Image: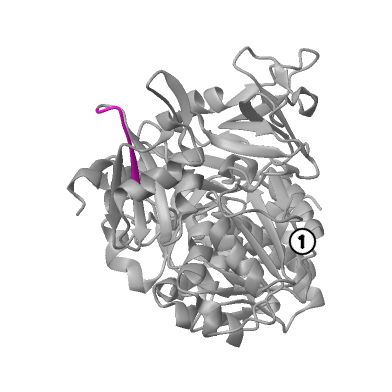
């Protein structure tokens, strides 16, 4: 295959009447998905040609401004049929952030629905009213499929053409749009489906938003394997009983969630109320998974497979993984594991020299270094952002024989005695306190293992030189918390401040919102 549309068409032929994607109100079979996508692609081509007067207008960004529904998936595929690439814009995203993205993106069109017509009218480009065509799903429904034009577009496609761009936070406050190609997706999804045995019997319960890279794994593996993808209503994660009943009633057997979502089930002891005998695969990524909560899952679903996946948006989704194959204490941390097939990783120390598993010392660990990724998973770069692209997508510093572009992740890692990679922290999460270099992730693992703590986050106030631990859970004695943390980490790593909150704040991706905590921890009561 050289194009993701071949996956859709193959599944539509093999499983025409099988449910492909379903939300709480609607569903699409594979054949319906293909047909709706073709109609959408034909409509886009008509509008773009009408507006731009360019017969060969392709490989341009089209923004998709919709809720997370099965029809959004059809819109994504329709954009690809038109020869362009889609950019997911969260319908709940603040206008200011959307407009910042649009200033970089300059989309040639926006797909939305009548429900969001008023919101779409408020979108701007460079402070002015958006002049690019706004296209509505309702208008596309009765469009005739233009097979001739779709065929002409398809014949010109190559596997390095972009499929989508996902915008992630930037260190300067300006989002960066990682551009992912057909080759990236095809290579990555082959690994994902092979490794986790994703087949037409797989039934996903999808948690992550479409603008988050984790959703790529579920969505495209569903299309490739002929699986079924159920969209879990976001509000169900605030009502765990409904969440568990949804998984049970939809016969979900595979989930791939952020760790915070798994912790909700554990913290509320939900297996006490609802059993999930059909759930056989529990995959997670996006954050460090607290072992206390994972051990709860393993106790209640002992026969399920558990896997810790690690990777940035810039490697399509994942570059290393670890299938849990041994016991861990509550205070321990899961390894990142090993590189995915067809995705090479290597570690470089501060001196630029390679760190390898044979450099493990008496403590069972290698020196730490920065993780780099190479191979077909690595994105094309950032859209319309050559400066940030040049910083992160660099010529392999250990390969002088020919030019090879690799991704510099910014993640600090080590090897353990099993030869597995273990995550230390982001480079920007590493601090210097009391003359010591400290990894906040290590403190967090020790703190979150304390009985009675449901969720926690360690942040560093550089202006006050204070380590701060914020937690959700039972009201515990501050001195007792510090003593327990001190039993796991050196004295200089014990937090200076402990704050309790009724509910941890989460960002739009479902992760703990560290930026909000940094700005507000002092006023928390």
Vertical arrangement, residue 200 with respect to residue 315, above or below: below
Helix, strand or loop at disc 1? loop
The residue sitting at the bottom extreme is: 249
Q: Residues within 10 Å of mark 1 (few under 14, many from 20)?
A: some
Where residue 406 sits in the image (x, y, percent)? Answer: 67, 28
Q: Quadrant of residue 300?
A: bottom right
Vertical arrangement, residue 171 with respect to residue 219, above or below: above
Q: Is residue 125 visible?
A: no
Segment tinted magenta in the rendering: 464-469
| Residue 83 is a magenta residue | no
Q: How many marks?
A: 1
Q: Is residue 485 visible?
A: yes
Colour mode? one colour
Nearer to me, 244 or 499: 499
Quadrant including the C terminus: bottom left
Residue behind mark 1:
196
| Left-right relation of 411 to 336 | left
| Left-right relation of 237 to 338 | left
User: Residue at horizontal 25%, vertical 42%?
Assistant: 519
| Left-right relation of 320 to 496 | right
Where residue 59 sits in the image (x, y, percent)? Answer: 59, 44
Where residue 21 sits in the image (x, y, percent)? Answer: 61, 75
Where residue 462 sits in the image (x, y, percent)? Answer: 31, 28
Predominant secondary structure in magenta?
strand
User: Residue at horizontal 77%, vertical 78%?
Assistant: 15
Vertical arrangement, residue 245 with respect to residue 329, above or below: below
Q: Quadrant of residue 37?
A: bottom right
């Amino acid at each position: 295959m050289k194009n993701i549309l071949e996956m859709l068409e193959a599944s539509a032929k093999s499983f025409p009447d099988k449910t492909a994607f379903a939300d709480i109100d609607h569903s699409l079979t594979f054949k319906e998905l293909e047909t709706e996508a073709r109609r959408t692609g034909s409509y886009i081509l008509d509008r773009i040609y009408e507006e731009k007067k360019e017969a060969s207008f392709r490989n341009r960004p089209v923004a998709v401004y919709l809720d997370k529904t099965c029809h959004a998936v059809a819109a994504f595929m329709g954009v690809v049929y038109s020869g362009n690439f889609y950019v997911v814009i969260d319908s709940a995203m603040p206008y200011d952030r959307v407009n910042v993205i649009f200033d970089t993106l300059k989309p040639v069109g926006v797909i939305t629905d009548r429900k969001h017509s008023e919101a779409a009218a408020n979108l701007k480009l460079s402070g002015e009213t958006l002049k690019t065509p706004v296209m509505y799903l309702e208008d596309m429904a009765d469009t005739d499929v233009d097979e001739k034009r779709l065929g002409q577009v398809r014949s010109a496609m190559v596997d390095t053409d972009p499929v989508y761009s996902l915008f992630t936070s930037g260190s300067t406050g300006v989002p960066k749009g990682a551009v992912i190609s057909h080759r990236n997706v095809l290579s990555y999804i082959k690994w994902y489906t092979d490794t986790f045995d994703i087949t037409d019997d797989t039934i996903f319960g999808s948690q992550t938003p479409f603008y988050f890279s984790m959703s790529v794994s579920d969505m495209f593996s569903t299309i490739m394997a002929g699986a079924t993808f159920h969209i879990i209503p976001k509000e169900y994660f605030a009502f765990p009983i409904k969440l568990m009943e949804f998984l049970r009633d939809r016969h979900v057997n595979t989930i791939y969630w952020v760790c915070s979502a798994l912790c909700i089930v554990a913290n509320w002891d939900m297996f006490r109320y609802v059993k999930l005998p059909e759930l056989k695969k529990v995959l997670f990524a996006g954050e460090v998974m607290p072992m206390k909560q994972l051990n709860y899952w393993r106790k209640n679903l002992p026969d399920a497979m558990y896997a810790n996946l690690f990777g940035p948006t810039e490697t399509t989704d994942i570059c290393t993984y670890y299938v849990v194959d041994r016991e861990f204490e509550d205070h321990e941390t899961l390894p990142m594991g090993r590189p995915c097939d067809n995705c090479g990783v290597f570690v470089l120390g501060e001196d630029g020299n390679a760190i390898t598993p044979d450099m493990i010392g008496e403590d069972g660990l290698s020196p730490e270094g920065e993780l780099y990724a190479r191979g077909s998973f690595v994105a094309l770069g950032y859209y319309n952002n050559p400066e940030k692209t040049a910083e992160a997508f660099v010529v392999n510093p250990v390969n002088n024989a020919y030019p090879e572009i690799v991704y510099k992740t910014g993640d600090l890692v080590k090897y353990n005695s099993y030869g597995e990679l273990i995550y230390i922290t982001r480079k920007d999460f590493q601090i210097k306190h009391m003359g010591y270099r400290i990894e906040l992730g290590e403190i967090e693992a020790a703190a979150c293992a304390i009985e009675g703590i449901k969720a926690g986050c360690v942040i560093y106030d550089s202006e006050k030189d204070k380590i701060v631990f914020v937690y959700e859970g039972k009201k515990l004695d501050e001195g007792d918390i510090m003593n327990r943390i001190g039993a796991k980490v050196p004295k200089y790593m014990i937090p200076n401040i402990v704050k309790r909150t009724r509910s941890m704040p989460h960002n739009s991706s479902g992760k703990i919102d560290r930026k909000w905590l940094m700005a507000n921890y002092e006023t928390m009561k």
